[in-house]
Image (cartoon, rainbow, N blue to C red):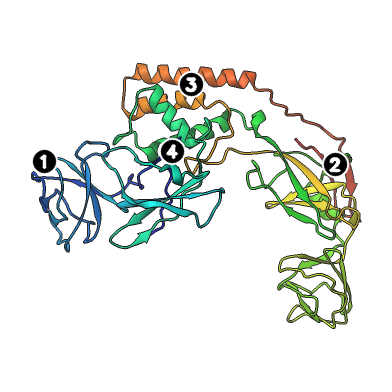
Amino acid sequence: MALEKPSIKEVKSNVVRIAHPYLSGNKTTYLTAELDATGIAITVKDNTDFADDDYIILGEVGGQMTEIVKVNAAVTPGTAMTTTACVFDHPIGEKVTYIRYNQLQLYGSATTGDTSPSAIGSLVGIDVKSNYTEILVDTADIESYYYVRYYNEDATEYSSYSESASAGGLSNQARGEIKNEFLSIYNEKIDDLITDDWLNRSINRWQRELSKRRNQWSVLRYTDIIETTQDTQAYSLPSDIQDENTEEAIVSVKYYNEPEIKYADEELFQKLTFDHIGSTLYTDIGLADITVVLDNTNDFADSGTIYVEGDEIAYTANTRSTNTLSGVTGITATHTADDEVWQVRNTGSPVRFTIDSDYIKLYPMPGSVEADKNLYLEYWRKFTDLDDDQDETLFKYPENCYLYLNWQVAIRRKLSEDIIMARKAQWQIDLEQLVAEDPDFREIRIQPMNFYKTNNSNFYSSNRYV
C-alpha cells in the first residue's frame, strides 16, 4: 500500500479539521439495486477492480447518510459485492467509491518537523458525511503543532505523517486558507466537480499564471547565504531559483562589503581555469588513512600534493588503473566522498562566477582568507507548487487567487460564456493592477564587453547579469 500524505485543512482554537484521503481518480461505480440499512449484499453496475478488504464509500461525500463499509468477501467479476453491514438506506444510482483508508490518528508536538509526534486520543473514523474530519482536542492535550496519519484498519497500515500545522492556525497565504476563504466568499462547496484535489491543482495553475505575467515579482527577489570553503570551486544553487542553467536569475554575487563578482560565460570560465587539475573524492578519507581514492587520477602527477578543503596532503604514488593515491601523509581533517580535490588551482578572492548545471562556480576558488566567509547570492525565486495545505504561496495577495478560482469554477461547471468571460475579466483586471503596483526592484546592469583572443578564434563574454 502506497504511503499517502494527509493534510490538515485548518486549526482553530482546539478544533482540527483534516482533509479526506485522496479520492480523485479512484475507482467508482453506482448501485443498481436499493440497499436497506444493515444490508450486506450490494449490486453495482460494475465491480471490476474492487477486491476483498477494500473500503468503499456509499453515497456522495458530504451527504447526511454517506458512510464507509468494507468489502467482506472475494469479488467475482460482475455486479455483486458482499460488504460489512451498512447503517443507512441507499437508493438506486447512489455512488460507490474506493477509499484507501477508513480511520485517522491525530498527533501533537511542541515543535514543527517532528518525525515522531505523540498520539492524541484514539483512532477515529473518517467522517465522509462531512467534507472533512473534525477533531475536538481536549484542553489537556493541546499542543503547539498538530500532525495526522491515515489508517487502514484491515491492513493495520498507516499513511505517512502530514506536514505540521500550527495551533495558531493557517496564514492567509496558506493553500488551506485560500481554499477555505474562496469557498466561503463565493458560497461554493466541495462536490464531484469542485473537489479538494481540483482546487489544489487550480491554485498551482494560478501560480504558474503569475509567472507568465511577470517572472520577477518583487516578492520573488531573495538573498541566499553560501558559506564558502577553501579549495572548493562549486556550490549548489538554491532549489527555488528560477533558472539553474543560466545567469538570468542571478541579481548579484558578493561577499559582504566587497565588490560584486562578475559573471563569466562558459567559454570564458574554461579559459580562466584551463590549467586546473582536479577531481573529487570517490570515498571518505579519515585522519589515519594512507591512501586516497579519487573519481579520476589520470591528470595527477605520479607523486606530489593535493588540496582538499584547506588540507595539503602529500602522496608518493599514483595508481591510475584504480584512481588511488598512496603513501599519503598530512591529513588533518576528515573529508567525505564528492569533496573537491585539486592539484593545480588558483585561490584567492573570487572575481568571476559561472553557472553550471545547478551549481555556481567561482574563480579563483576561495583561499584561506575566504574560508568560512558568507557569500551573498541574490536571485529570483520561482513559485513552487503548494503540495500541502500548510504550504504558503510567496504571493502576498491571495485575493487574486479567489478571483482566478471563481473563473475556473465557471469553466468547470460549464456556466454561460458571458459569466465565464466576466469572471476572467475580473481576475485579469485585478492582476494587471497588481502588476502596475508591484515595486519590481529589478535592475539590469551591463558591463563593458571583454574580448579575449586565442590561437584559434576571437570570442567575448558580455558579462551581463540581471
Residue 1, placed above or below residue 265: below
Using the image as rendered, state which of residue 187 and residue 297 is in the foreground.
Answer: 187
For badge 4, the amino acid type reads Asn
Single out the mark in the foreground, 1 or 4.
Answer: 4
Identify the residue under disc 2.
256
Give residue 19's position: percent from left, percent from top. 38, 42
Label 4 near label 3: C-beta < 8 Å?
A: no
Identify the residue under disc 4.
14
Callout 2 crowding tier (Cα within 10 Å): few <14, some 14–19, many ≥20:
few
Give residue 438's position: percent from left, percent from top. 65, 22
Determine the image quadrant of residue 220.
top right
Q: For the C terminus, which image quadrant?
A: top right
Can residue 84 be seen here? The reply is yes
Q: Earlier in the sequence, mark 2 or mark 3?
A: 2
Residue 388, placed above or below residue 210: below
Q: For the N terminus, which image quadrant?
A: bottom left
For badge 1, the amino acid type reads Ile
Label 1 near label 3: C-beta < 8 Å?
A: no
Q: Earlier in the sequence, mark 4 or mark 2?
A: 4
Residue 18 vs residue 125: left or right? right
Single out the mark in the foreground, 2 or 3.
Answer: 2
Give residue 115's position: percent from left, percent from top. 52, 56
Callout 1 crowding tier (Cα within 10 Å): few <14, some 14–19, many ≥20:
few
Give residue 12's position: percent from left, percent from top. 45, 34
Identify the residue under disc 1.
92
Single out the mark in the foreground, 3 or 4.
Answer: 4
Identify the residue under disc 3.
427
Q: State how far apart marks 1 and 2 are (Cα).
A: 72 Å
Q: State how far apart marks 3 and 4 are (Cα).
A: 36 Å
